[in-house]
Amino acid sequence: MFTLFVDSDSLPLRHRKIILSRVMKDGIRTQFIADRSLPDVMDAIETHTKMLRDPFRGSLAKEDLRKIRSSITMTVVETGENSADDRIVELVNDGDLVITHDVGLSERAIEKGAIVIDDRGDVYTQENIRKRVSERDFMKVFREMGINDLGQKSLREKDYQRFSNSFDSIISKKH
């Protein structure tokens, strides 16, 4: 069984809602990792746990009921450059899924055999990550020259839809 790792530090709330809805429905083992606790994720964990326990209330002892927990966790790491990324790389295994827009983390996770989806729905694998790394490095040269207007544009509705479709497609194949 695979684990879904979510680089949550800068992932928009709307993305987290898409992810949480699906993982709660399917019971997918998911770790949100960030340098702070995210209220929406904590609420989802509580709601999911309650939803899983409700059918057994009255038929299980309290200690057995407490053993039923959500498959979603929230890991808070120390604040610092790449602290969430480093934790994900430490935990990720072959066949896992990572959601991030960080190209460096994408490359590191793929080296460990993970599949990566970015916040726009692009899926990165061993076959295509080198191109994305080259693009990032190319853009870095422009930023160092003081040309900053070539960066990523803000998310549009079609980006959210593309992310949702990519995410659903991969989860359907893996689940």
Image (cartoon, rainbow, N blue to C red):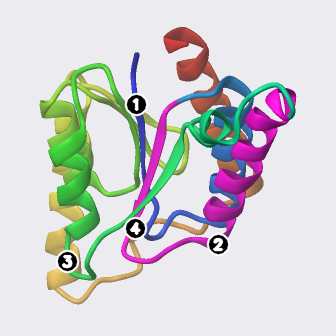
Residue 97: quadrant of the picture: top left
Residue 95 in the magenta stretch? The answer is no
- First in sequence, mark 4 or 1: give its number: 1
- First in sequence, mark 1 or 3: give its number: 1
In-image side of 145 versus 33 (left or right)? left
- First in sequence, mark 4 or 3: give its number: 4
Quarter containing the C terminus? top right
Report the amino acid beneath label 1. Thr
Identify the residue at horizontal 68%, vertical 65% (top origin): 40
Quarter containing the N terminus? top left
Residue 3 badge: 1
Mark 1: which secondary structure? loop
Question: Which residue position holds label 3?
Answer: 81
- State the CA–CA distance, disc 3 to disc 2: 22 Å
Q: Position of residue 116 (x, y in %)?
A: 36, 36
- State the CA–CA distance, disc 1 to disc 3: 24 Å
Whether residues under marks 1 and 3 lie with C-beta atoms below 8 angstroms apart, the answer is no
- State the CA–CA distance, disc 4 to disc 3: 11 Å
- Label 4 environment density (alpha carbons within 10 Å; few <14, some 14–19, many ≥20): many
Range covered by the magenta-colored residues: 29-57
Mark 3: which secondary structure? loop
- State the CA–CA distance, disc 2 to disc 4: 12 Å
Closer to viewer: mark 4 or mark 3: 4
In-image side of 135 versus 145 (left or right)? right
Whether residues under marks 4 and 1 lie with C-beta atoms below 8 angstroms apart, the answer is no
